[in-house]
Amino acid sequence: MEPNVIAILGAGAWGTALGYCFASAGYKVRLWCYESEVATQITQYKTNTYYLPGITLPETLNATFNMSEVLNDVSYVVEAIPVSYMRSVLTKALPYVSEKQTWIVTSKGIEANTLLFPCDIVRSVLGYTISVGCVSGPSLASELVLRVPTALAIAHDNSDIRNKIHDLMSISWIRIIPSADLVGVQVCGALKNVYTIILGLLQGGNYGFNAQAYLFIKICKELESICAAVGGLESTVYSVAGIGDILVSSYGPSSKNKALGYALATGQSLDDFYRLGSVYPEGVNTARTIGALALKYGAHWPIATRLVYVLDKKLTIADYVRELLT
């Protein structure tokens, strides 16, 4: 296995930004791309105008759409695929996976048909003996490549492997905060997208900061309940993986989930949002699955579970916000 080589699956903004960071820290990076034209542009011209324009990528970052080339003889694989596509990409990767590899999952969401969180999707496809951890936290790709100081949570069930991933990802402008709560970190990452849409609704509807602050407190309490029900720690809500990530997504400049909430509040429909060429927000998928997760655990999570009725025009935004602030 080549210890100085990092494989990354996914060449969107986040996967490309991570590749930039690893390559800048001295690693050789192999980036798997779904689109061959993206791979060609990254390898030949050291740029990704499709997903992360304006950034010159390091010479040690190369891309391909050939999965075997990416995964051959690497110790660490970073996964950066939208949850709805994870299973198909992992199935493509399966013939080239080694049990000696450690997989670092960065996706945030819940798989619709199985209600699995990302690390369990990896295990269900690649086998339950594979080493899997996750990275999450407040991290805009656009800031990461500008070397803005960033803190991320890294979670793994094995403390020795967790420490190795900590060392791997401790790049000069990135602070890694270890966590033993693999479940809670994933729960917070998934629900962050849903709550960001909701806070975007309030911002777009000009409900003011007083209302947003009150709702934020209610969101934290509900997220505690979800973490506890699924098997995570309530304390993870109050970490970079929890409120840190929600704050950046809800009040930062570039969240597609916040943009959707804002657009809905200003009169656009979900179809309008997509028709205008906007990127599909992961929070929509999670909003459609969280109700089934609540039923599975016999739980009541009205802030998250009621959003789908707004998306499907079965509940007005005004009535939904009235419910939220009661």
Image (tube, rainbow, N blue to C red):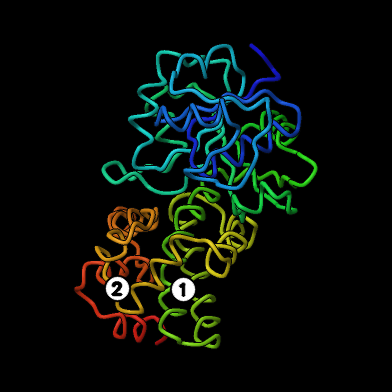
Which residue is located at x 27 percent, y 60 percent?
275
Kindly give the residue lying farthest to the right in the view shown. 172
> Can residue 295 be seen?
no
Give the quarter of the image for residue 127: top left
207 versus 115 height, above or below: below
Considering only order in the chain, which callout, 1 or 2, is on the residue closer to the N terminus?
1
Indicate the amino acid at tag 2.
Answer: Gln
Q: Secondary structure at mark 2?
A: loop
Nearer the observer, 70 or 130: 70
Q: Residue drawn 43% across and 36% down?
A: 120
Say whether residue 114 is left or right of residue 232: left
Label 1 crowding class (10 Å Cα cut-off): few <14, some 14-19, many 20+? many
Is residue 262 visible from the viewing direction of this image?
Answer: yes
Residue at image location 75% in from the left, 27% down from the top: 26
Horizontal side of 119 relative to 142 (left or right) equals left
296, 321: nearer the viewer: 321
- Name the residue carrying label 2: 268
| Quadrant in which the N terminus is drawn | top right
Kind of residue at badge 1: Leu
Residue 310 in which image quadrant: bottom left
CB atoms of marks 2 and 1 within 8 Å: no
From the image, tell me which residue sits under label 1: 199
- Residue 134 lies, with reference to residue 265, above or below; the image says above
* Residue 190 drawn at (x, y percent): 45, 53
**Is 246 situated above or below 171?**
below
Q: Position of residue 132 (x, y in %)?
A: 54, 31
Residue 107 in picture, x, y percent from top left = 48, 43
Q: CA distance from mark 2 to mark 1?
A: 16 Å
Query: SS class of the residue under badge 1?
Result: helix
User: Which quadrant, please, contains the C terminus?
Assistant: bottom left
